[in-house]
Amino acid sequence: MKRLLPFILAFGTGTLLNAQITIGVNDFASPGDEVYMGTDDLPPTNLPLGTPGTNKSWDFTTLETRSLDTISFVNPATLPNGAQFPASNIAQVQGSTIIYLNKQSNSVSAVGTELIFSGFPIAVNFNPGYTVLPFPTSYLDNFGGNYQFEQKVFIGIDTTVTVPLMGNIQVKVDSVWIKRQSDIDANVDSWGNLTTDLAVVAALRAKVVQQNVDTTYAYFGNPIVVPGFINITQGWNLIDQQFAQTIALFSPELAGALGNATGMDTITTYEFFANNYDYRFASIEVDETSNQPTNAQFISNESLLVGMEQFESMPDLKVYPNPTADEIRFSQQIPAGTVYKIFDMKGTLIEAKTVNSNVLSLQNLSSGSYAIMLYHNDGKLMAMEKVVVRK
C-alpha cells in the first residue's frame, strides 16, 4: 500500500498551466491499456464550453460520474471476429461495442466496428476508414473523413397481423438491409487548461460534427396491400418514416423488429485531448440548436480507486449517507486504532486522523468529491469509499 499511494497521488496532481500542447502517438493507447470513463447523462446546462481561441480555461468539476465504463484496448487477433478486420492492429472494446482501429506513427484511424445497430448485431468494415486522430495533433488542425457501411441481417419473421376491417394478414419478413453514410469533421479550435475532479491538464479542444444518413430496407416474402394505407411489394422495401409509422399502427411489435427508419441526424461534440491519458480526456455532446450539453464522458476520478479493491480487508464496509452535508456513518464497527485519510480527487491529502467512533465529521470539507481510505493500525488498507459532499 505504501508503494501504491504515492503513485495515485502523482497521477492526480499533474498540472500544466498556460501551455499549448501537441498530441503524439504515445498519447494514444496501445494493446493492453485500459481507460476508465465516467459518464454524466445529466450534465449541467451551464457547463463552461466557451468560445474558440487560445489560453482558455474550462472548469468541469461539476460533472458527476453517474456511470463508469472500462474501455479496453486489445489485439484484434484475440477477439472472436477479429479476423474479419485485417486492416486493424488495435481494437477498442467498450461493452458490446468494438471499434477496430489502425494505429500508425502518423495517425489512428477507425476501420470497422461491431455493435448493436438499430437493434441488430452487426460487424462491418468501414469503406473507407476515417481519421480518429492525426499525429501530431496541434491547435488549428482539421481532420476526420467520411465512411460508409452496409449489412444485411436475417430476422425470419413469419407472423399474422390483425387489421381492422381487413381481418388477419400474413406477414413474412426475411431480412433487413442497413446502410449508413457518415461524414465527420473535426476542428481543433482551442487550447487551454481543463479542470476536472481528477486533474488540471493542458488540453486541446476539437469541435467534432458528425452527420449520419441511415437507410433501412426490409425484404418482405409476400405482398401486403391495405387500400389507402399500405402497399408493400414482395422484395426489398424502403423503411422511411411514413412507412414505419403506418406499420406501427397495425403492429408495434413488427415496427420494433424492423428497426429504425431511414433518417439523418447530426451529432456535435467537443473533444478534449491531453498528454499521457491514452484516450480523449473528455467529450461533451451538445444540442445542435442550443449548444447546451446533453451528455458528458470523461476520464473519471473513479479511476483513482479502480484496481485497489484487491487490497481491501473489509470490502463490504460502506459509508452513508452519500452524498452528505456534514457527516458520514460506517456500516460496520470500526476496529480500535483505525486511521482514516481523506484525499480530494487531485490526490491532495486533506485530513488524516484516528477514527474515534462510527461517525465521522466532514464539516470542514467544501462541496466536492473525496476519497476516504481506512487503514488498520499496521498500515494495511481496510476499506475505501468515494464520498460526495454537498453543502
Image: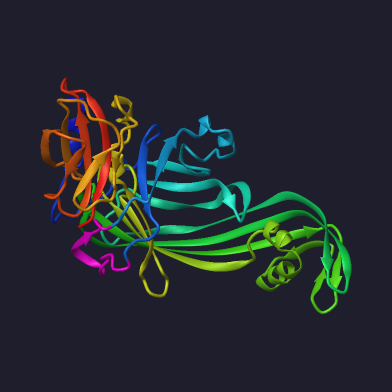
Residue at 34% from the left image edge and 50% from the top image edge: 65
State which quarter of the image contains the C terminus: bottom left
* Depth check, front residue: 91 or 241: 241
Find residue 148 and report its image quarter.
Answer: bottom right
Above/below status of 352 relative to 284? above
Q: Is residue 105 visible?
A: no
Find residue 230 and report its image quarter.
Answer: bottom right
- From this viewpoint, which residue is outermost toward the top? 378
Residue 300 rendering spot, x and y as whole percentages: 31, 46
Q: Is residue 262 visible?
A: yes
* Depth check, front residue: 244 or 314: 314
Q: Is residue 256 left or right of residue 69?
A: right
Residue at 13% from the left image edge and 53% from the top image edge: 17
Q: Is residue 190 left or right of residue 165?
A: left
Above/below status of 80 relative to 320? above
Q: Main secondary structure of the magenta part?
A: loop
Residue 29 rendering spot, x and y as whole percentages: 36, 39
Above/below status of 182 relative to 33? below
Residue 268 rendering spot, x and y as whole percentages: 41, 65
- From this viewpoint, which residue is outermost toward the bottom? 228
Q: Identify the coloring.
A: rainbow
Task: Count the labels in the image.
Answer: 0
* Depth check, front residue: 125 or 63: 63
State which quarter of the image contains the N terminus: top left
Over which residues does the magenta segment extend?
45-62
Residue at 35% from the left image edge and 48% from the top image edge: 38
**In magenta stretch: residue 15:** no
Find residue 46 and report its image quarter.
Answer: bottom left
Residue 163 rendering spot, x and y as whole percentages: 83, 69
